[in-house]
Image (cartoon, rainbow, N blue to C red):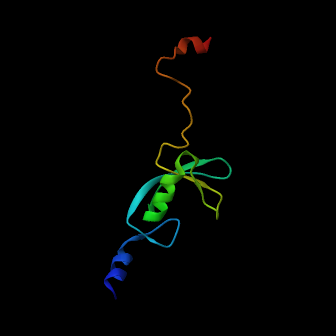
Amino acid sequence: MKCTDAYASVMDQCAFCPRPAPGRWALTAQAVDGSWRREILSLCVRCDDLMRQGGEQGRVLKATGERWYGGWTMGRPEPKWTPNQDLSREEE
């Protein structure tokens, strides 16, 4: 067994391609039906770069039609309450 084969065997595989993944990253996915989910996935350097390039538009995974975004901040619904909001007025 080569030294590189031993190294690749202890690394995780990228969630989007067959390359070895040196780390895990927080990702947010939007399904075709509009639902959101957040996961921590292993990504190779190439796929990590592609996620970063996707920005606010994200990247579409052709196999499933899901749109993936880097980080946890994408897809959060806007809050209905703000810190300076007067709650007593809304009840009237």
Q: Which residue lies furthest to the bottom in this view?
A: 1
Q: Nearer the viewer, residue 1 or 82?
A: 1
91 left or right of 13 in image? right
Q: Quadrant of residue 13?
A: bottom left
Q: Residue at x 65, y 47 (%)?
A: 34
- Residue 10 versus residue 69 in the image, above or below: below
- Residue 3 versus residue 23 in the image, above or below: below
46 left or right of 34 in image? left
Q: Which residue lies furthest to the right in this view?
A: 33
| Residue 58 picture location, percent across and down | 56, 51
| Residue 68 picture location, percent across and down | 56, 53
Q: Which residue lies furthest to the front in this view?
A: 53
| Residue 24 picture location, percent across and down | 40, 59
65 left or right of 83 in image? right
| Residue 90 picture location, percent across and down | 59, 15
- Residue 73 versus residue 20 in the image, above or below: above
Q: Nearer the viewer, residue 20 or 39?
A: 20
Of the 4 image quadrants, the one containing the C terminus is top right
Total labels drawn: 0
Q: Which residue lies furthest to the left in this view?
A: 3
- Residue 79 versus residue 74 in the image, above or below: above
Q: Residue at x 56, y 32 (%)?
A: 78
Of the 4 image quadrants, the one containing the N terminus is bottom left
Q: Residue at x 37, y 66 (%)?
A: 22
Q: Which residue is drawn at 60% across and 14% down?
A: 91
